[in-house]
Every structure is written in structure tokens, then in C-alpha cells.
């Protein structure tokens, strides 16, 4: 079955997204992930099998609940600075970015009974929770061009930049995507107060990106935060209608607390699913839902089951 490069997740049908593999591997399976990067797993058959396991589990849930799935490549921090910290060269990063997409392309080819969208994931240049050196939009574009150019040569349907914490980096990534002809979605992370780690409100960050890029981002998301941290800032306003997805943490802990954690806070999977279902009921345009840090397939099942029941 040929897959056209459309963006079916832009409709109202539910799509699942899972971004919690790193914490699950580290805390639940004892897998060492230097730099909190999962892309080095591509270098061993065992590692590739681990990644395939997450993708297969997600697809099985999508089959069970008759929803779609966004498969995110393991390339979140596969950029030059973050790669250099764990001994990756420009050449190895290019190869691993290409390999990561090839893996998810193969998985989609094996499942033509589920709507699957392939996402080339891009992450922040610095720490996703505590950015030290903020870039201008031009610097961010220049920096992220390298990875985005590589991803633009693949069959990824779009690029999503996740766990971003200030608008300038997002602006640079959106511009880079436009240069290389790949649609880009932007996902911000927020602190317990619903603001980005730099203090700007979610609303103002989204408006800033849209104004600087002529609304070129295909949509926005929030990831790596618990619903309690941002539900109070959501409003039925034009800026929030640009947000299509919520990929949430299991824990109510702050980013600082999560950084210090020696064990994983699984939260309450049933409650988390209910919270996301409530948000989908309130804001039916939210069509991409899923789990980030601390979540596993228990949480994903609760999210799928309860969110699907809200809007069948």
C-alpha cells in the first residue's frame, strides 16, 4: 500500500504519539543512555530490537482502538553539540539520522492496516529543561540546518521539534524546514506554572513563532509536562487552535525534580488517560495524544481507550 505524504493527523481522528522510551529504557530496563540519547541503540541489533518493540506496541494499540499513530524517529538529540558530548561525529550523526528513518519506514511497510505517519524528530541544542545559551532565530536556523537537511532526504512525512523551551529556537527550525522542503511541527515544554522554562507564556511563544514564520509550522504541541502544569493556561482562542497535540509526563514533578530523580514516578495511568480525554472533550481539535517521560504502554493504553471514547 502506497502512503501519500499527507498529514492525516491534521484532521480530527485520534493519533497516538509515544516519546517516553528514554525514561522507560533507563529506569525500567536498566539500559545506559549516555546523553539521554536513544539513537545510539541503532548501532546494535539488540538496540534496534528495543526500538522496534516500542513501535510495534504502539501499532498494536492503534489496531486495538482503531486510531492512527505517529512514529517518532530516535533522533531527538541527534544534533552536533549533543552528539559531540557522547563522541559522535558529523558523519556518524548523518548516518544514524538516516538509519533511524529507514527503521520506521520499514515498520510502516509491514503495517498497512493502521494509519501511520512518520516523524523525523529534532530536539533542542541545549538542555531541554534549562537552556543556558539562548540562540537568536538566525543562529538556531544555522545550527539545526545540518540535521534537518539530512532528514529532508528521507521518507519522513514531517519533522517535529520537541521539548523546545524558547521561541527563537523554534523559529529557526521552522525556517530550516521550509528551506529543505519538510513540513515542521513545534512542541514546547512548560514548567509547573504553564510557562516555558525561559518564563514566556505558551500563548506568547506560539504567537511569536507564527508571526516570525508566517504561520509556516504545521501545528504546535506541548510535551514533557503533566496536564496539571498547563491545563489552566489553555483557552478557546485562536493561538490554542494551533495546538494539535499533548504528549504528557506521568509525573507531576517539576523538570528540576525529574532531573534529580533516582527512580521513575509512574503517576496514575488511568488518571492520566482521563485527564487527556477531558481535554479532548473540551477541545476537540486536539487529535494527537500520548505519553512522554515516565509513561509506558500502560499509560498509552489508558490514553487511547479513554480519548477514543470521547470522540469515537
Image: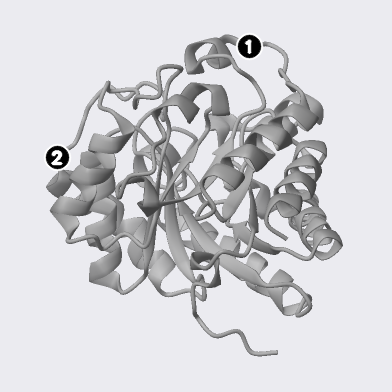
Residue 149 spot, x, y in % from top left:
33, 66
Residue 173 vs residue 36, the one in the foreground: 173
x 60%, y 17%: residue: 252
Task: Say which label, 1 or 2, has the lower sequence index.
Answer: 2
Q: Is residue 96 above or below residue 199?
A: below
C-alpha distance separating marks 1 and 2: 32 Å
The vertical placement of 266 against 6, above or below, is above
Q: Is 146 or 202 nearer to us in this picture? A: 202
User: Which residue is located at x 15 percent, y 52 percent?
Assistant: 211
Q: Is residue 209 above or below residue 152?
A: above
In this image, 113 relative to 106: left or right? right
In the picture, measured across the screen, residue 109 lies left or right of residue 128, that is right
> To which quarter of the image does residue 104 belong?
bottom right
Spot occupied by residue 172 in the image (x, y as percentages of width and height): 22, 51
Q: Which residue is mark 2?
A: 136
Secondary structure under the numbered disc 2 in the rendered image: loop
264 on left or right of 150: right
Residue at figure coordinates x 79%, y 40% from the top left: 302
Amino acid at each position: 500500500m502506497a502512503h501519500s505524504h499527507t498529514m492525516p493527523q491534521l484532521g480530527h481522528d485520534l493519533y497516538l504519539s509515544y516519546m517516553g522510551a528514554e525514561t522507560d529504557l533507563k529506569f525500567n530496563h536498566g539500559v545506559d543512555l549516555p546523553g539521554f540519547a536513544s539513537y545510539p541503540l541503532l548501532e546494535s541489533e539488540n538496540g534496534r530490537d528495543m526500538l522496534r518493540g516500542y513501535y510495534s506496541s504502539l501499532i498494536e494499540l492503534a489496531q486495538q482502538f482503531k486510531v492512527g499513530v505517529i512514529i517518532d524517529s530516535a533522533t531527538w538529540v541527534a544534533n552536533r553539540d549533543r552528539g559531540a558530548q557522547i563522541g559522535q561525529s558529523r558523519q556518524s550523526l548523518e548516518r544514524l539520522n538516516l538509519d533511524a528513518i529507514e527503521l520506521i519506514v520499514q515498520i510502516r511497510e509491514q503495517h498497512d492496516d493502521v494509519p501511520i505517519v512518520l516523524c523525523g524528530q529534532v530536539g533542542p541544542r541545549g538542555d531541554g529543561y534549562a537552556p543556558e545559551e539562548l540562540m537568536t532565530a538566525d543562529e538556531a536556523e544555522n545550527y539545526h540546518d545540518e540535521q534537518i537537511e539530512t532528514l529532508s532526504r528521507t521518507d519522513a512525512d514531517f519533522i517535529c521539534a520537541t521539548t523546545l523551551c524558547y521561541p527563537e529556537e523554534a523559529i529557526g527550525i521552522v525556517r530550516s524546514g521550509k528551506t529543505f522542503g519538510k513540513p515542521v511541527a513545534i512542541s514546547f515544554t512548560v514548567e509547573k506554572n504553564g510557562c516555558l522554562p525561559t518564563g514566556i507564556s505558551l500563548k506568547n511563544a506560539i504567537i511569536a513563532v507564527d508571526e516570525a514564520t508566517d504561520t509556516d509550522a504545521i501545528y504546535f504541541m506541548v510535551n514533557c509536562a503533566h496536564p496539571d502544569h498547563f491545563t489552566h493556561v489553555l483557552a478557546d482562542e485562536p493561538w490554542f487552535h494551533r495546538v494539535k497535540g499533548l504528549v504528557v509526563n506521568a509525573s507531576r514533578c517539576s523538570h528540576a525534580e525529574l532531573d534529580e530523580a533516582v527512580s521513575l514516578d509512574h503517576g496514575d495511568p488511568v488518571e492520566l488517560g482521563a485527564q487527556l480525554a477531558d481535554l479532548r472533550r473540551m477541545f476537540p481539535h486536539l487529535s494527537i495524544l500520548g505519553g512522554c517521560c515516565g509513561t509506558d504502554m500502560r499509560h498509552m493504553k489508558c490514553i487511547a481507550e479513554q480519548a477514543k471514547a470521547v470522540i469515537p
